[in-house]
Every structure is written in structure tokens, then in C-alpha cells.
Amino acid sequence: MLKAILQNLRDPGWWFTIVFAGLVVGLFTHYLKDWTSRLISHFSKSYRVKRDLRKQQFENEVQSLARNPHILTIEYVRTVHTAVLLIGDIFLLLAMPTFVFSFQQILLSESGRANEVLLILLKWFMLFSIPAGILGIRLEIRLIKRFKLCEEARLEFRKGVLEEESSKKSVDSDKQ
């Protein structure tokens, strides 16, 4: 059993699959949450009220950001910051096994107690990887929400700029 676990942990394809599956599950759950929210709101009036309130808050944030392009820029920077944190978290999850097995090779060259130390390292790694995975999913959800907010606000801002330009053109054409 331990040999099979160690063999899987050594395989980079296994790690890639785990991280990729985690990202796909995170995206799927985000959209599943929206679908579930709509479904529940059909049956529960209090849930519908809360959902509509959240929707209104989102629209208010979009309007607020669209009115102030400087704050919209700051929100985009926060979105990029969240993306960098997510990439760092994914790197940590992918790099950790490399560190564990590099340490194993050092221990194997020095003593025969490597298996005991490796088991301790693997336990610590497993304990660390669970919160790191949860953090990655939370960061992914936050990134999706921020990006959606910024894009809606950017489109609203752009629509306002285009309307302003067309009204200026119509005023200029009226003067002529």
C-alpha cells in the first residue's frame, strides 16, 4: 500500500491530474452554485429575497466601479493579485512533492532511516496540502467573482463613454 502511494506521488502526471481536476472542480462548483441558487429560489421565498439582494449589491458595485475608473483600475489590480496568489498556491502544491522526494534522496544516501522520516514528511505534506487545496479553491472562486465584477463594470463604463461621445456629437451637429 505504501509503495503504491509513493509510486503515485513520484509520478508528475498524477500531480498534474490532481491540480487540473481541482481547478475543473472549482469552476464546476462555481457554476453549479449559481444553478442551484436559481433552483432553490423557485421554491423558497426567503432564499429568493436573499438572492435578489445579493444581485442588487452586485449591480450597485458594478455601477459604483463604472462611475469611477480609478477604483475600477484598483479592482483590476486586486484581481491580478488574486490570480498571482492562485498561481503561487498551485506552484506550492506541485513543488511540494519535489521537495519531499529530494529530501528522501538525501536521507537515503546518509542512512537507512529514510522511510521513517519520509513517512513523517508525507504526513506533514498531506496535512499541508489539504488547506492549500482549499485555499486554491477559495482563491479561484474569488478570482472568478472579481473578474466578473470588473468586466461588468468595464462594459458599463464603456457604454457610458460611448453614450457621452454620441451625445456630444449630436450637440455639435445641432450647433452647426
Image (spheres, helix red, strand yellow):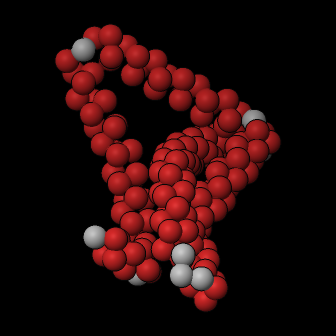
Q: How many callouts does the rendering have? A: 0
Q: Looking at the image, which residue is at 32% across and 17% down?
A: 48
Residue 49 spot, x, y in % from top left: 37, 13
Q: Is residue 11 above or below residue 29?
A: below
Q: Residue furthest bottom?
A: 109
Q: Looking at the image, which residue is at 48% across and 58% down?
A: 123
Res 105 seen here: no
Q: Quadrant of the C terminus?
A: top right
Q: Residue furthest front?
A: 112
- Residue 22 in which image quadrant: bottom left
Q: Looking at the image, which residue is at 64% across and 85% down?
A: 110
Residue 145 spot, x, y in % from top left: 52, 42
Residue 139 spot, x, y in % from top left: 55, 48
Q: Nearer the viewer, residue 149 or 133?
A: 133
Q: Looking at the image, which residue is at 19% across and 18% down?
A: 43
Residue 135 spot, x, y in % from top left: 54, 48
Res 96 seen here: yes
Q: Residue furthest left?
A: 43
Q: Quadrant of the N terminus?
A: bottom left
- Residue 87 in which image quadrant: bottom right
Q: Residue furthest top?
A: 46
Q: Is residue 21 above or below residue 32?
A: below
Q: Is residue 67 left or right of residue 15?
A: right
